[in-house]
Amino acid sequence: MWRLALREIRNHWRFSGFFALNLALGFVGFVLLDAFEGSVEATLRERSRSFLGADAEVGSSRPLSADEVAALDAAAGQGARIARATALFSMASNGDRTRLVELQAIDPAFPLYGAIVLEDAGAAVAAERADLAARRGAWVDPTVLGQLGVDVGEPLRIGALDFLVTGVVARDGGRATSGFSIAPRIYVAEQHLAATGLVSLGSRVQYRRLYRSESTSATELADALRAAVADPALSVRSHEQATRDLARAYSAVSDYLGLVALVAIFLAGIGAAYLFRAHLARRVQDIAILMSLGATRARAQRVFLLQLCLLSSGAAILACGVGALLAGVVPRLAGDLLPPGFELRIGLRTLALVAVLAALGSAVACLPLLARLRELRPAELFAEHVQPRLGRGPRDALWLAPAIAAFCAIAVWRVGSLSAGGLFAGVFFGSLVLLAAFGLAGLRALESLPAGSPLALRLAVRELVRSRASSLSAFLAIALAVQLLSIAPQLRGVLDDRMQAPERGALPSLFLFDIQPEQREALSAHVAARGARLERISPMVRARLDAIDGEPVATRTSDPLSPGSDQSRRLQTRRYNLTYRERLTPSETLREGRDFSGRYPRGEGSLPEISLELDFARRLGVGLGATLAFDVQGVPVAGRVVNLREVRWNSFQPNFFVAFQPGVLEGAPQVFLASVPALATSEREALQASITRAFPNVSSVDVTRAVRRLLGLIGQLQWALSSTAALSLGVGLVLVFAVARDQARARRWETNLLKVLGADFRRIRAALDLEFGLLGLLGALAGSAAGLLASGLLSHLLLEADFRVSLVPLTLTLAGVPALSVFAGRIATRHVLRERPLALLQAAGA
Amino acid sequence: MILEAVDVYKHFETPGGAIEVLCGLDLAVARGETVAVVGESGSGKSTLLSLLAGLDAPSRGQVCIEGRDLAELGEAELAALRGRSMGIVFQQFHLMGGLSALENVSLPLELQSVRGAEQRAREALDQVGLADRASHLPARLSGGECQRVAIARALVVEPALLLADEPSGSLDERTGDAVNALLFELVAKRATALVLVTHSDRLSAACDRRLRLAGGRLIAD
């Protein structure tokens, strides 16, 4: 059987090559994404110690007491190495320009794993660290040089202190990625932090105590540290736990892209089924002969199934090969979105997975065709004018069920969620059905072409209508691919409108935080004196969630996880930013419940009122009437939920998950946030610099710059999305090519007869161009319409934005896809067109 | 007897009603015997051959090859019987276009997992005078050469029974005569039983017996 299958492949190498190419194209995206996931996992796993800089760390928003330090050090064991780091956001300035930076004040032992590598100096060892402390130096991220216009050896003001730039960080093992951060990192020696004046009551500072042990595992060390601390506000995590959240973020992105790649695979499956159907139709007689020579029907089916599996495995290898070639390009294009040290590796696991998917996928896609072999009657070999042919029965459609089930199963597996995967599959098949209906309606409409139409058009339409199955297959492939391709640029247009045009929206220029209470009035006056105004001044109180409906958060879980699991630990140790206000802000919408009933009436015994953000409430598993108990820096404060609200986070205004009614938190330690409405660039930069000079502890984010950065990241993601979708278009065009080639072969006799009857080359070519041009145009129209519909829905439901059609990508699609379709058709039919009609007469006379 | 067909009926259902093609047909062929079956177009000759080859089943009656009732055999057993004990020569040759002459001839042996298939196939091709065309595809062979390859394919398994459907029907007279002569020579050498469907009086006269298919039955002619 192997020999027969291999011989089939060898003897029909054109079909074999085409089939494998079609599948390979469909799987390239999947290969890259699977390899990406595996590589991210491997990188994070290998480098997680470097990312954390330790085996385990203890984090706190307050300095650790001496007793706590002693207990932790004892728990870590003798011989454990210890380091300290303090992190906070602040403004750095060269005098004229200011930027938000992430300040890391480190001790000489930091980090315990990995290294901070400086340009020119290499890994920062004892000499560089001594220099950092002695010269009040600063090691800066390279972007700081450009943003602030400073160089090595020049001063940099941070808070109330001037530092000297003594090094540029070439590689920072502790930076998992710079892609998601809007603040570049600056390292200074810890002994200079106090003098900056940045650490005061209410400041958001993260104190880290890091441990490295040679005698215990990281998990055991983390457990020992956890047991040594009494205050649940201190967070303890091992290096594995630290990278888990990051892995989750990458996983979410690759899951989404994986779904798009899945569509390409499905289209490749349609292409495979079409190619195989055509191939099988040409081989029916041979199969009948095989059966007459002693092969059973099942054996004949197995030979072709084996052929499919072998070709699919070849396609998997080809896909992995192409993926390996592209593997060098992807990291360069994704750039700072990826963890340092990331290498895209396509391993055996990916190859095996793709081979299995390809073999199974093509087998189930071609199952309906193989099943029709059961209707084959080899006895027809004896008939004089009858050729053996495949049967067709009412139960043929049932054989599609395995393919549909397989697609749904893979979608669920990719996303890791039954509901999300099922929804995707449902939407996909819904689109397929709608597009198919459109396609059939289009073909029906073409049938009523007026009789006086040009001959070339009539010939083209007749062929499309006559070969309904193949026309519909090619149409669906193109339409689905176009639909996918059009979503990303349309949504990008909406995002651009939404985020980059302050005159149309209400985006602020500057977002200010860490404003001390006593600075409010002075800061407002300072901003007003420069022709701007301070808005949405909002208090922010740090607190920890202690209990929900009387149940301590430490033992509460929303699913059967044991206490101490990641989820309950996050709930338990996370600091929440509370605020208080009288009413909702313009970026909020009340969804359930009622507004606050004014100021909290002390002494009446009722619980204060709380407003929760809708998604946050859902994650906590609470609704209206729930009671939440907080620890506000040692003082217990409880409240009852009276409303749930939706927040437009992309307004870049001060927004909060939890808001109390006025009269509850005013006495708590707090800082303030505020925003400054739209300003021209020069005004914005000047104002930002003046605020930093006058109020060194106040940090500010240039929202315009941040939005630009965010859009840049979105652009990179969009590139990834469009590339994956482009694979679908490639598969669609391969299918068009296959259809064209088959059609040309099927009507070779007719085409040559036309030539004999006097049709010239140009007219026949025109008919073919019109045929494939119409196919491409119908597909592009339907796909674009479906894509616009999907984009509109996504804009409204996900982005809460008005949808506006981006004309450029739409026009490019409507013009480009039919052109590509005509081109594919020309390539496929050139041999038949150039053939001399004499071949027709010679064939007839044989 | 190598072949026994007893009281065989075969009808086909059509929208207009059932069409009886064979009505109580009997046939017995001994080892090494050559039998010609003649009849007009539409008399049921192709149907008879398909029943004898086990490619179709009678509506009623029994067909036995080497004493085994075909109706009692499963698909695998039937295929194996066909591959080992029968050879078929079609009017349109029915060679597999993607295989060379040698590969076409060795195919029945490969299907039965016979060792030395290629060597035996070469010998068979040599016997039909096409040893030098072993690597050629059917498209490069003439009609007569294709039929000779088909004969070699049918006889390479050394079947007990050979079914031939108008072996020279698609060939010109001279080529057809040559092919027929070769067929009879090889059949005689192997003492293979032959059931030959033909329109040709000359060809039917070369057989041991001549039967006419008429009214759905075989009668001595």
Image (cartoon, rainbow, N blue to C red):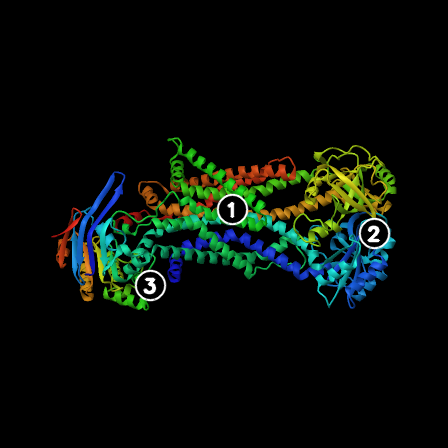
Name the side, left or right, on which A799 lies relative to A554.
Answer: left
- Identified by mark 1, the residue type is Leu
Q: Quadrant of residue A441?
A: top left
- Judge by depth and name the residue closer to the eye, A813 or B60: B60
Q: Position of residue A313 (x, y in %)?
A: 47, 58
**Dot 3: chain letter:** B
Label 1 neighbourhood size at 10 Å, few (<14), some (14-19), many (20+)?
many
**Helix, strand or loop status at disc 2:** strand
Q: Position of residue A648 (x, y in %)?
A: 70, 38
Q: Position of residue B26 (x, y in %)?
A: 17, 53
- Judge by depth and name the residue closer to the eye, A414 or A808: A414
Tell me the distance, in whole angstroms, between the alpha carbons under discs 2 and 3: 84 Å
Residue under disc 3 on the same chain as residue under disc 1: no
Which residue in the structure is indicated by mark 1?
A729
Mark 2 / mark 1, whichever is N-terminal: 2
Q: Position of residue B116 (x, y in %)?
A: 32, 69
Q: What is the number of the mark on residue A156?
A: none
- Identified by mark 3, the residue type is Glu
Q: Nearer the viewer, mark 2 or mark 3?
A: 3
Which residue in the structure is indicated by mark 3?
B110
Residue under disc 2 on the same chain as residue under disc 3: no
Which residue in the structure is indicated by mark 2?
A158
Label 2 neighbourhood size at 10 Å, few (<14), some (14-19), many (20+)?
many
- Judge by depth and name the residue closer to the eye, B153 or A634: A634
- Identified by mark 2, the residue type is Ile
**Helix, strand or loop status at disc 3:** helix
**Dot 1: chain letter:** A
Name the side, left or right, on which A493 lies relative to A471.
Answer: right
As drawn, A688 above or below A13: above
